[in-house]
């Protein structure tokens, strides 16, 4: 019943035919469980809910709060948790993002585990001051005498097919520029569970951005146990010899397809890497790969200019200069606001990524 | 430097004042400082008590059945104006129903109805000057309809076709129209609120007789922007009407979880402005209050806060399901007893201005207009790809012009991967 309600709510939120994402219609490719043991088939939304449940179960100081989280949240990530843990631990806040993050900083500084939800990443900006000037500097300015490490802020991000300006944005670039916080973006259900538990338990404020188009669209066997996946550790999803293809979050699904297309149409062997943590990011895995392949394609949905791809490209050209066979290619959103009706032209879709792979190979 | 010195002198003055109060017997004056309230030794007098204030009552003109409760409160509008309010209200109800259905059929991606809150739109819009600037939240399309924005224009925006004034870039219901002095809607809550006093200040400086109205909900009123907006408007004496639609819910969150005080109207006192609480389902009461507020705003050049008490009869949007969080017997009660359309119809019938025959004809004509608008809008092409890149800046920078060429080349190279055929 709850599952049905959740499905119907999400379908209503984003139209009845989910996901109407790309003209080329990429679907989620289920992954093998990252740890041993019993599994259950979970969608991304259920894996997040399961991680939150375990975080609450294993830590009596943990609290979940934000707009509409009491009844389960608009995406149903906190469904049933108020019933299970009570309204002192799972509660609605007044409608104020700066309030939510500031409150979370205070709660975390007191020593409680604060798990805040911002309804959409697009709506996090009123909290920017609390993030940049407070959460990020709390430890540094007090020489670790005080810190808000037990704070985690979750927010759905990214394209969904019909979100327009204010329900589609990828905001990780803003936060990647803020020393003192961590930024994590999972690519699917079992990754999300392990990375979210690690984020909640990490003793630094973590911003955890969830790819909203995968909440219902991605399902796979997820271990039911309590497990964490390492932060600041990229993962090589597919070994290859010709081109390193680098991304994170929902873009990994697109890049998988582009790599397959490159293999089948060009006979090109791609090494696909999911960065997983955007800040602080895993330089070594990326550098080693590019030194091997000599070519790099980076992709994200956020606009090209000053996107996180710029940081990746700059570091790689400095560290792998003598190994590079072609200029690094970035395949990103264009430098415009996210445009509803032009979404299929705006996002870095499969063929744009494929074309970039072809470009570095043909150089 | 001078300001710093003045602050220092001010602080010294304060210090002297404190010493004066503490050591009056030594010859210092014991009177209150030149700025600020009197002193008291009675703590009760200096207490803001939750028990001493009664909830502000709600001003109304019509009974639930549409009967004029007090003839002295009759706004005296010409019959045709009240009939026009009703006709527009029916138009909004019908277009809401049909676009909601269109979303359910997958024809449009999203929709939000104004179900139950229609009187706040038409009562306030009718009391404004047509050139008073509107900053809306997203649930006030009736204000646009009142000013002549057509049902066709609404439908075109919701279908994001080539006739949408903003080139299909925003989600449905994000209307705007310079011709109707209506700023384009932004989804983030309360962001329009501090802008309204800025615009109003500009109007005042330019010697305009117009004012600004800014609409927002009980949820948005909790954002930091709401506080900044009202404080700026009061402090800088900006001619702006803050119009809160208090509909009981912010998506799923009831007002009891959004504020603890007596709603919004009494906050006016804290900011130093007039405030009114009105029955938001009584179109004539909303008209009277907005008219009075406008007079005050324009005459005094200072802001006013209106809190319209209404009720969201529908879900927040097509994205959620109210049965998951709203008490449906409460919804039923508001629908049966306080529905603004029924109430206004009751009034019109009591005045001999309306009957069943007129009702049937209006509903049938309106439905036909909307049906054909949807049929037409659906067949229209989407805007040209060109418009992905226009309006980012006044003049597209070189880098953006190159990006446009890149997209065009990509589309030409891989045509099967882009939906070019549906675009102009």
Image (tube, rainbow, N blue to C red):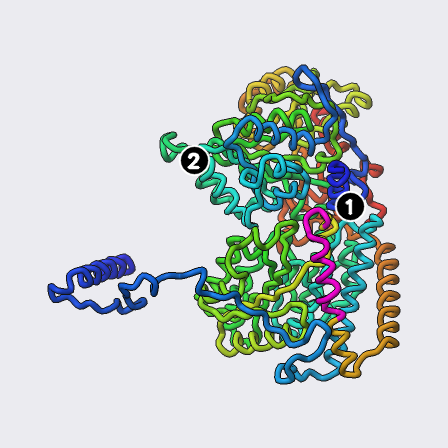
Q: Residue B155's spot in the image, x, y percent? A: 79, 60
Q: Chain of mark 1?
A: A
Residue A176 visible in rendering: no
Location of mark 2 (residue):
A110
**Predominant SS along the magenta part:** helix
Q: Is residue A299 above or below residue B187?
A: above
Say few, some or many: other residues with alpha carbon within 10 Å of mark 2 (under 14 / 14 to 19 / 20 or more).
some
> Tags 1 and 2 in contact by the CB under 8 Å rule?
no
Depicted A269 relative to depicted B290: above or below: above
Query: Which circle marks residue B156 in the picture?
Result: none
- Looking at the rendering, the stretch of residues picked out in magenta corresponds to B323-342
Question: Which residue in the structure is indicated by mark 1?
Answer: A15
Q: CA distance from mark 1 to mark 2?
A: 42 Å
Query: Measured from the top left, where is residue B122 in percent x and y?
Result: 69, 71
Left or right, B156 with respect to A106, comes to: right
Q: Which of the chains bears the disc numbered 2?
A: A
Going 81% across and 35% down the picture, which residue do you hit? A24
Q: Residue furthest left?
A: B26
Asked if residue A84 lies left or right of residue A353, the reply is left
Where residue A230 appears, as percent x and y from the top left, is 57, 21
């Amino acid at each position: 019943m709850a599952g049905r309600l959740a499905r119907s709510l999400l379908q209503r939120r984003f139209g009845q035919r989910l996901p109407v994402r790309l003209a080329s219609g990429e679907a989620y490719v289920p992954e093998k469980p990252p740890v041993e043991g019993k599994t259950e088939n979970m969608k991304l939304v259920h894996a997040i809910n399961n991680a939150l449940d375990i975080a609450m179960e294993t830590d009596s100081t943990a609290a979940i709060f934000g707009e509409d989280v009491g009844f389960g949240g608009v995406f149903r990530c906190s469904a049933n948790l108020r019933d299970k843990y009570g309204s002192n631990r799972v509660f609605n806040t007044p409608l104020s993002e700066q309030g939510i993050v500031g409150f979370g900083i205070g709660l975390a500084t007191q020593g409680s585990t604060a798990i805040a939800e911002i309804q959409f990443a697009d709506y996090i900006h009123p909290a920017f001051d609390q993030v940049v000037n407070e959460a990020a500097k709390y430890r540094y300015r007090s020489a670790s005498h005080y810190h808000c490490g037990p704070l985690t802020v979750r927010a759905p991000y990214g394209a969904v097919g019909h979100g327009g300006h204010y329900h589609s944005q990828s905001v990780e670039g803003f936060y990647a520029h803020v020393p003192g916080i961590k930024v994590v973006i999972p690519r699917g259900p079992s990754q999300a569970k392990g990375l979210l538990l690690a984020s909640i338990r990490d003793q630094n404020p973590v911003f955890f951005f969830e790819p909203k188009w995968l909440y219902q669209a991605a399902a796979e066997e997820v271990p039911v146990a309590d497990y964490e996946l390492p932060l600041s550790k990229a993962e090589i999803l597919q070994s290859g010899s010709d081109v390193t293809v680098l991304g994170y979050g929902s873009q990994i699904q697109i890049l998988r397809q582009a790599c397959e297309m490159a293999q089948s149409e060009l006979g090109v062997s791609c090494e696909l890497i999911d960065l997983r943590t955007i800040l602080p990011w895993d330089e070594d895995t990326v550098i080693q790969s590019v030194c091997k392949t000599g070519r790099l394609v980076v992709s994200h949905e956020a606009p090209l200019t000053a996107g996180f791809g710029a940081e990746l490209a700059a570091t790689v050209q400095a560290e792998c200069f003598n190994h590079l066979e072609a200029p690094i290619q970035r395949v990103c959103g264009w430098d415009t606001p996210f445009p509803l009706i032009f979404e299929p032209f705006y996002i870095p879709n499969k063929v744009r990524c494929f074309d970039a792979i072809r470009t570095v190979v043909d150089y | 430097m001078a300001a710093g010195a003045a602050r220092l002198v001010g602080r010294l003055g304060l210090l002297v004042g404190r010493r004066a109060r503490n050591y009056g017997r030594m010859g210092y004056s014991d009177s209150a400082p030149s700025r600020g309230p009197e002193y008291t030794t009675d703590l009760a007098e200096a207490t803001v008590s939750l028990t001493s204030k009664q909830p502000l009552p709600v001003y109304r003109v019509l009974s639930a059945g549409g009967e004029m409760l007090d003839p002295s409160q009759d706004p005296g509008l010409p019959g045709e104006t009240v009939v026009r309010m009703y006709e527009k209200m029916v138009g909004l109800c019908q277009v809401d129903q049909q676009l909601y259905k269109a979303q359910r059929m997958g024809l449009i991606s999203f929709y939000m109805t104004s179900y139950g809150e229609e009187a706040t739109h038409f009562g306030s819009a009718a009391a404004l000057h047509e050139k008073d600037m509107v900053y809306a939240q997203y649930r006030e399309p009736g204000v646009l309809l009142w000013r002549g924005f057509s049902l066709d224009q609404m439908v075109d925006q919701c279908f994001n076709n080539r006739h949408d004034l903003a080139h299909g870039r925003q989600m449905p219901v994000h209307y705007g129209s310079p011709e109707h002095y209506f700023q384009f809607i932004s989804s983030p809550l309360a962001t329009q609120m501090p802008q309204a006093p800025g615009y109003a200040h500009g109007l005042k400086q330019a010697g305009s007789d117009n004012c600004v109205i800014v609409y927002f909900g009980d949820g948005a009123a909790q954002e930091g922007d709401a506080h900044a907006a009202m404080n700026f408007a009061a402090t800088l004496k900006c001619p702006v009407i803050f119009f809160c639609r208090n509909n009981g819910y912010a998506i799923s969150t009831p007002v009891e979880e959004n504020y603890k005080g007596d709603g919004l109207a009494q906050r006016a006192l804290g900011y130093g402005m007039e405030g009114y609480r009105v029955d938001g389902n009584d179109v004539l009461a909303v008209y009277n209050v907005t008219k009075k507020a406008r007079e005050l705003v324009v005459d005094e050049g200072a802001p006013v806060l209106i809190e319209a008490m209404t009720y969201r009869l529908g879900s927040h949007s097509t994205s959620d399901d109210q049965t998951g969080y709203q008490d449906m017997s409460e919804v039923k009660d508001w629908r049966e007893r306080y529905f603004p359309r029924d109430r206004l119809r009751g009034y019109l019938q009591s005045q001999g201005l309306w009957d069943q025959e007129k009702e049937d004809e209006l509903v049938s004509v309106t439905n036909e207009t909307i049906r054909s608008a949807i049929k037409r809008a659906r067949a229209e092409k989407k805007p040209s790809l060109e418009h992905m890149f226009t309006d980012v800046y006044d003049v597209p920078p070189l880098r953006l012009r190159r990006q446009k060429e890149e997209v065009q080349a990509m589309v030409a190279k891989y045509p099967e991967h882009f939906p070019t055929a549906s675009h102009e």
